[in-house]
Amino acid sequence: LQGHIKDYDTLDRIDTGDDEVRLYKLTANSKPLWIAWVENYKLILPWDEIPQKTISLNVQNELIVEKLITEDGKTTPDKQEYSTNEIIITPTPVFIYEKD
């Protein structure tokens, strides 16, 4: 987490029109980074369905989505490449950045 958000120049919350979507855009060294998650204000139990939402980012490049590590002992985050600008998010925060 700290590696993504240190030394940022700007931080803005992006209004998606959905109260359950948290989407923030950071800029560091002229490169954008987004942090997103679903905030549904409910306790999610292991047998509950995980809430999902789709967000759309206005970018031209492919995106990398990196999931926040939430498991004990895990040191490498799960990453997924998106060739579309539509990203599925859940209550687990993700870091989204453009592929180099």
Image (spheres, grey):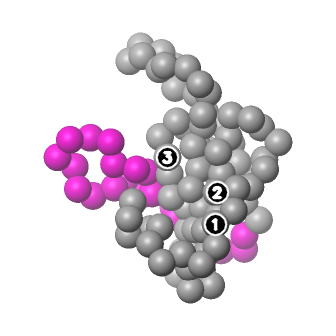
- At x 77% / y 65%, what residue is drawn? 58
Q: Which element is circle 2 on?
A: strand
Q: In the image as oriented, which residue stretches furthest toward the bottom?
A: 29
What segment is highlighted magenta in the picture?
59-85
Relative side of 47 to 100, left or right: left
Question: From what the image shows, is residue 25 above or below residue 32?
Answer: above
Residue 92 screen position, x and y as percent: 47, 40
- Residue 65 visible in the picture: no
Question: From what the image shows, is residue 39 above or below residue 77?
Answer: above
User: Total number of numbered labels?
Assistant: 3
Q: Tell me the amino acid under the disc marked 1.
A: Leu
- At x 59% / y 50%, what residue is drawn? 36
1 and 3 marks in contact (CB < 8 Å): no
Question: From what the image shows, is residue 99 above or below residue 44?
Answer: below
Q: Nearer the viewer, mark 1 or mark 3?
A: 1
Q: Which residue is mark 2?
A: 24
Q: Tell me the amino acid under the disc marked 2.
A: Tyr
Distance in Å between CA atoms under marks 1 and 3: 16 Å
Identify the disc placed on residue 78: none
- Helix, strand or loop: magenta stretch: loop
Q: Which residue is mark 1?
A: 11
Alpha-carbon neighbours of circle 2 within 10 Å: few (<14), some, or many (≥20)?
Answer: some
Identify the disc placed on residue 93: 3
Q: Quadrant of residue 54?
A: top right
Q: In the image as oriented, which residue stretches furthest toward the right?
A: 17
